[in-house]
Image: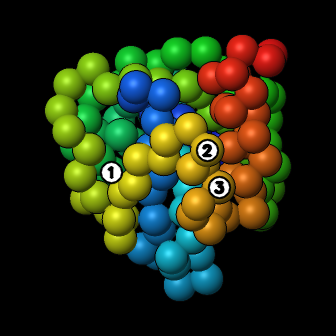
Amino acid sequence: MDHIVVGAAIIENGRLLAAQRADPPELKGGWEFPGGKVDPGESDHDALVRECVEELGVKIAVGRRVGGEWPLSNGYILRVWLATIASGVPEPLEHLALRWLGPGEFYDVAWLPADLPIVGAVEGLLNGSS
């Protein structure tokens, strides 16, 4: 059975929220989409909402899915959705830093290799090309 990880491509005013990992050591400093593992018996959407509260202190509204299933290491797969902030202001509760990336800035941070192709897919959705 695949282990599911969910991620939120949080968009506000055309900007994308990137989160800088604090751990584990081999991923520290890399940038990713906020999110995390889906717990047993939990839906993808419920996990995504829970993770954003835990990691960012915000409640999100989940939008359309970005692509299909993105492979990660160790048998994990990543599923990503566009999201908007329903309430709260994002804080780096479990990350080193957060950064809003405007149009033309999406690649200004060192995305983790697994997240990098998703950035392009998000950009395509925002630009209406898919």
Q: Earlier in the sequence, mark 1 or mark 2?
A: 1
The residue indicated by pointer 1 is 55
- Give me the C-alpha separation between circle 1 and circle 2: 26 Å
Q: Residue at x 39, y 42 (%)?
A: 51
Q: Position of residue 119 (x, y in %)?
A: 68, 43
Q: How many neighbours does mark 1 have within 10 angstroms: few (below 14), some (14-19), or many (20 or more)?
A: some
Q: Quadrant of the C terminus?
A: top right
Q: Nearer the viewer, mark 3 or mark 1?
A: 3
Q: Earlier in the sequence, mark 3 or mark 1?
A: 1
- Give me the C-alpha separation between circle 2 and circle 3: 8 Å
Q: Nearer the viewer, mark 1 or mark 2?
A: 2
Q: Is residue 30 left or right of residue 98?
A: right
The residue indicated by pointer 2 is 104
Q: Quadrant of residue 68?
A: top right
Mark 3–mark 1 CB contact (< 8 Å): no
Q: Amino acid at mark 1?
A: Glu
Q: Quadrant of residue 94?
A: bottom left
Q: Amino acid at mark 3?
A: Tyr
